[in-house]
Image (tube, rainbow, N blue to C red):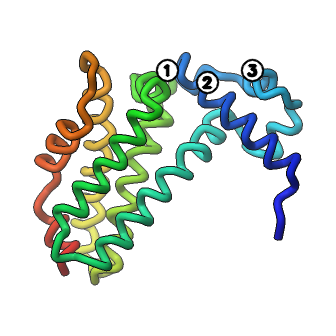
Amino acid sequence: MTTDPRFARSADSLADAILALAAERPIERVTVTEVARLAGVTRATFYNHATSPAALLAQVLERELDAIRGDFLGRVEDGAADVEQIWRASELTLVDHVLAHQAVYRQGLTAADDPRGSVLATLLANHVEVSLGALARTHGTPESGPEATRVAMAAAFVGQGTAGALRAWLNTPAPHDPAEAVDALLSLIPPLWFAVARA
């Protein structure tokens, strides 16, 4: 199945526009009209790609985050003996992703007007939580019962903590050293997760 070139061009234009606007202010304050105008497309075309500016931004960033998750899970399966090194490399890739989009994340990880919180904080937290949940499932964690509950809670804890830690890191004065961020993140990960990865 081939993608319509016009659809692909619209997708690229919308991705560029949403990243530019999200670097200026929190995505919760960006409108469909603004995104469509900057991308040079109609509102109808925008809605062919996403339901809202926040959903579009999530789609754009999730492409990279999904690739990070896939690489991490694949490398753990291939070499669990070196789990700390694999984990460090994956955290560095995540930190590099955040740094590559630092203006977007700096805007998006701040306190949102929405009482439900920041879309980007939720995106990052969910990325980590889903990644750890997938790791646990492939390493024999039960799908129900007290152990499953403990692991789910631990995944949510690390996910929320990672989003908060990256917000704090981005809010420190530049330059931002990715290696220092990774050292801090790794020092905060509960040992449970390294045990799960080795199981």
State the mark number for residue 25. none
Sequence-first tag of 2 and 1: 2
Tag 2's secondary structure?
Answer: helix
Can you say whether 3 is above or below 126 in the image? below
Mark 2 and mark 1: Cα distance apart in space: 20 Å
Q: Quadrant of the C terminus?
A: bottom left
Mark 3 and mark 2: Cα distance apart in space: 11 Å
Q: Position of residue 156 (x, y in %)?
A: 31, 53
Task: Write down the quadrant of residue 169 in the picture.
Answer: top left
Q: Residue at x 36, y 69 (%)?
A: 73
State the mark number for residue 20. 2
Residue topped by disc 1: 113
Identify the amino acid type marked 2.
Ala
Asked whether, in this view, residue 194 is left or right of residue 60, the answer is: left
Q: Position of residue 148 (x, y in %)?
A: 27, 73
Q: Residue at x 42, y 28 (%)?
A: 102
Eye-nearest disc, 2 or 1 = 2
Tag 1's secondary structure?
Answer: loop
Q: Position of residue 3 (x, y in %)?
A: 82, 59
Image marks 2 and 1: residues in contact by CB distance under 8 Å = no
On the question of residue 189 being in view, the answer is yes
Can you say whether 190 is above or below 116 in the image? below
Eye-nearest disc, 3 or 1 = 3
Identify the amino acid type marked 1.
Asp
Can you say whether 63 is above or below 164 in the image? below
Task: Write down the quadrant of residue 95 in the picture.
Answer: top left
Tag 3's secondary structure?
Answer: helix
Q: Which of 115 and 39 lies nearest the eye of the viewer?
A: 39
Residue topped by disc 3: 34
Q: Residue at x 36, y 56 (%)?
A: 129
Sequence-first tag of 3 and 1: 3
